[in-house]
Image (spheres, helix red, strand yellow):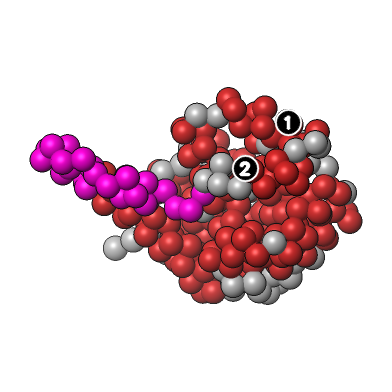
Amino acid sequence: MDDGRTRGLRVGEVAALAHLTVRTLHHYDSIGLLRPSGRSEAGYREYTEQDLERLQTVLLYRELGFGLGEIRDLLADPGFDRREALRAQRAQLARRSGQLDAMIALIDKTLAAMDEGIPMERTDMFEAFGDFDPAEHEAETQARWGETDAYRESARRARRYTKDDWRRFKAESDAVNEAVAALMDAGVAPDDPRAMDAAERHRLLVDSWFYPCPPEMHEHLGRMYVEDGRFTATYERIRPGMAVYLRDAIAANARER
């Protein structure tokens, strides 16, 4: 009986199998991310088992927030190891799963408190949102940079942000940090183009949320992440050595801009 492994699959079959559109697969083909490598007797292009394994890897990276160009570069690396990539992806998903479990537990605790008519402890209400607090160092930030255009622009934008905005920023920030951590897990050097791409995503995050951040200012931020113990501690909680790695990737990216 033919279980589908003894022959290649047409694009429509792969689209149905992977819950994608044919258009998406055509796009992956056009950018060199996933090109079907088999041929039918009639000369039609077909996806082999190895192509399906590559597609699985692509979709896992996509779910972790990687851009298609970053994924293509990762897979093009001669040193790419699928088993090691899967282990790194599993570690990232486990961390994300822990965060989601904490959010679910918080919701359950909140509903229980509402049902019982008992006010929650204030610290319990926000424990699942992590350590990010945009106002935590506001006084010191103003003292150090309050006269700068960057601070004034950052303060102007921040005044408009709602709690939902801050949660969205945190999600985008977490995605960038997870991408950097995955590169570290894979042993990618900070001056590798993939690490520089991640550093550029970090720069654009600052630029879009707070203030114009050209490469030279971004490089200054990178140094601060290592020199200021509080910033260092934030990154070290994500991955030991991450503050230095990010600083070096930022510096390498700035040299190329």
Q: What's the residue at 61%, 47% (across, down)?
A: 137
Q: Confirm or deny contact between disc 1 and disc 2 (CB under 8 A).
A: no
* Front residue of this view, candidates 23 and 48: 23
| 17 with respect to 225 (left or right) | left
Identify the amino acid type marked 2: Glu
Looking at this rendering, what residue extends furthest in the top direction? 160
Kindly identify which numbered label has been placed on residue 153. 1
Q: What stretch is highlighted in magenta?
A: 108-132
* Lower sequence index among marks 1 and 2: 2
Tell me residue 94's x, y (percent): 40, 63
Q: How far apart are marks 1 and 2 (CA)?
A: 14 Å
Secondary structure at numbered mark 2? helix
Decide whether residue 125 is among the magenta residues. yes
Quadrant where the N terminus sits is bottom left
* Front residue of this view, candidates 164 and 67: 164
Provide the major secondary structure of the magenta segment. Answer: helix
Disc 2: which residue: 138
Let me know if residue 43 appears in the view. Answer: no
Q: What's the residue at 89%, 56% (across, down)?
A: 255
| 34 with respect to 96 (left or right) | right
Query: Where on the picture, by quarter, is residue 177?
Result: bottom right
When the figure is inspected, residue 118 is found, relative to residue 165, above or below; the finding is below
Q: What's the residue at 69%, 54% (across, down)?
A: 198
When the figure is inspected, residue 23 is found, relative to residue 120, above or below; the finding is above
Decide whether residue 173 is among the magenta residues. no
* Front residue of this view, candidates 186 and 136: 136
Circle 2: is it few (<14), some (14-19), or many (20+) Cα within 10 Å?
A: few
Q: Which of pointers 1 and 2 indicates the residue nearer the eye?
A: 2
Let me know if residue 129 appears in the view. Answer: yes
Tell me residue 191's x, y (percent): 79, 65
* Front residue of this view, candidates 233 and 177: 233
Kindly identify which numbered label has been placed on residue 64. none
